[in-house]
């Protein structure tokens, strides 16, 4: 959330407009265009309104990051929870993978910005661990429900291997253009 969370409905709407504007600028014009002036112009708000909520560009980026993580967590949980359990681990993983990578592909530009461009930001990296925890918890549940199918009976190794595979595929989707 922004550094100074608004208490009035009108102020909340203004904050949302600024975050929406910042997301649009980031998606359409890239990180270099994400300036305080561009956000103010796009959101049709004032300089005082911006600085009253975000303090500076870094505060805006942190608020965008938190919003992105909340959205991502919701999308991953929905992707997992909307699936119907399958009879085999292979079918379950294929079904989950499709939903998960649809979420990753849809959010590719945001991942590039937050995971790659801001990788130096230890606070953002620490907050992003929540997504890894959600992913691990969901994969643990999925794999555990099929543990009798595992070639090796060590559940921890199987879960760790699956997480590493997903992370590698995630990086491939985020880092490489489709062309």
Image: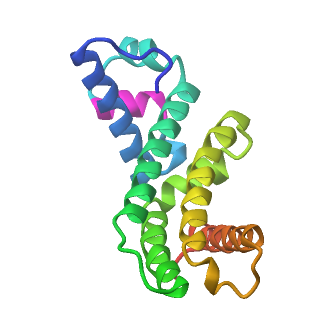
Looking at this view, is 24 or 74 the one in front?
Answer: 74
Residue 11 screen position, x and y as percent: 28, 16
Confirm whether the magenta stretch covers residue 36.
yes
Asked if residue 40 lies left or right of residue 121, the reply is left
Q: Seen in the image, is 59 located left or right of residue 75?
A: right
Residue 34 counted in the magenta span: no
- Residue beneath the point at 50% across and 29% down: 60
| Nearest the eye: 1 or 30 | 1
Marks counted in the figure total: 0
Q: Please tell me whether the stretch drawn in magenta is mainly helix, strand or loop.
A: helix
The image quadrant of residue 7 is top left
Q: Residue furthest front?
A: 148
Front position in the image: 48 or 119: 119
- Coloration mode: rainbow
Left of 24 or right of it: where is 115?
Answer: right
Q: Residue at x 41, y 17 (%)?
A: 5
The correct choice, above or below, for 123 with respect to 104 in the image is above
Most extreme residue toward the left is 10
- Residue drawn 29% across the image and 21% down it: 12
- x then y, percent, for residue 98: 44, 77
- The boundaries of the magenta stretch are 35-43
Question: Along the line of sight, which residue is nearer the eye, 81 or 44?
Answer: 81
> Where does residue 135 sit, x and y in percent of width and height?
57, 58
* Residue located 57% across and 78% down the image: 146
Depicted 5 relative to depicted 150: above or below: above
In this rendering, the answer to whether 57 lies above or below 163 is above
* The quadrant where residue 103 appears: bottom left
127 above or below 168? above
């Amino acid at each position: 959330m922004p550094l100074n969370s608004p208490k009035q409905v009108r102020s909340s709407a203004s904050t949302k407009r600024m975050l929406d504007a910042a997301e649009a600028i980031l998606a359409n014009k890239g990180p270099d265009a994400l300036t305080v002036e561009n956000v103010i112009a796009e959101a049709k708000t004032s300089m005082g309104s911006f600085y009253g909520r975000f303090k500076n560009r870094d505060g805006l980026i942190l608020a965008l990051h938190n919003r992105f993580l909340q959205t991502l967590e919701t999308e991953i949980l929905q992707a997992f929870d909307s699936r119907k359990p399958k009879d085999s681990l292979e079918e379950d993983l294929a079904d989950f993978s499709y939903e998960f990578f649809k979420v990753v592909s849809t959010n590719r530009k945001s991942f590039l910005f937050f995971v790659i461009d801001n990788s130096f930001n230890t606070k953002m990296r620490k907050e992003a661990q929540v997504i890894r925890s959600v992913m691990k918890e969901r994969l643990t549940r999925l794999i555990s429900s099929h543990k009798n199918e595992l070639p090796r009976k060590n559940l921890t190794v199987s879960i760790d291997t699956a997480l590493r595979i997903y992370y590698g595929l995630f990086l491939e989707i985020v880092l490489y253009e489709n062309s």
